[in-house]
Amino acid sequence: MSDLAWVPQSCTLPTAERPLRVAEWDALFSEQLASLSRPGPLRLRLDLTGGPGVEERVRDLVEREGGCCSFFSFTITPGEDLIGLDIAVEVEHAVVLEALATRTLAGGRP
């Protein structure tokens, strides 16, 4: 998944900036991912290890991602040791969520 062909055309982030954003998500997943589950085909649940600045980092990234990819719905559940991040999409973007889940499980490696 090293190329970004899975990024839908509805994403408004300039093409040149997409690899940088993907690298931010990859770093978050490789550094903080504690668990991943799929409560349904249109929903991804991530538990991220907490720590100084982690919640702020997640909130910043989610806010910026929501600004260019409005098809994502993010819900953050703060906690002392874990930060929950639920990501949901409509059915027409299920393949994007699947690609994100696969990339997340791979620790950001294509």
Image (cartoon, helix red, strand yellow):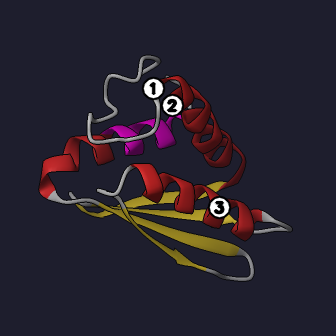
**In this orientation, which residue lies closer to the viewer: 48 or 20?**
20
Whole-number angstrom distance, CA of label 2 to CA of label 3? 16 Å
**Pointer 3 residue:** 60
| Residue drawn where x is 38% and y is 41% of the image | 12
Report x, y in % for residue 4: 40, 23
User: Magenta stretch: residue 102 in it?
Assistant: yes
Q: Secondary structure at mark 2?
A: helix
Residue type for callout 3: Asp
Q: Secondary structure at mark 3?
A: helix
Residue type for callout 2: Arg
Residue 18, numbered label: 2
Residue at far top of view? 3
| Residue drawn where x is 53% and y is 75% of the image | 76
Apparent side of residue 26 relative to residue 85 in the rendered image (left or right): right
Whole-number angstrom distance, CA of label 2 to CA of label 1? 5 Å
Q: Chief secondary structure of the magenta span?
A: helix
Q: Quadrant of the N terminus?
A: top left
Residue 74, numbered label: none
Of marks 1 and 3, which one's residue comes earlier in the chain? 1
Vertical comparison of 94 with 66: above or below: above
**Pointer 1 residue:** 15
Residue type for callout 1: Thr
Q: Residues within 10 Å of mark 1 (few under 14, many from 20)?
A: few
Whole-number angstrom distance, CA of label 1 to CA of label 3? 20 Å
Residue at far right of view? 52
| Residue drawn where x is 57% and y is 38% of the image | 21
Q: Quadrant of residue 74?
A: bottom left
Q: Which residues are magenta?
A: 99-107
Report x, y in % for residue 105: 48, 41
Report x, y in % for residue 32: 69, 54
Apparent side of residue 81 relative to residue 13 in the rendered image (left or right): right
Q: Secondary structure at mark 1?
A: helix
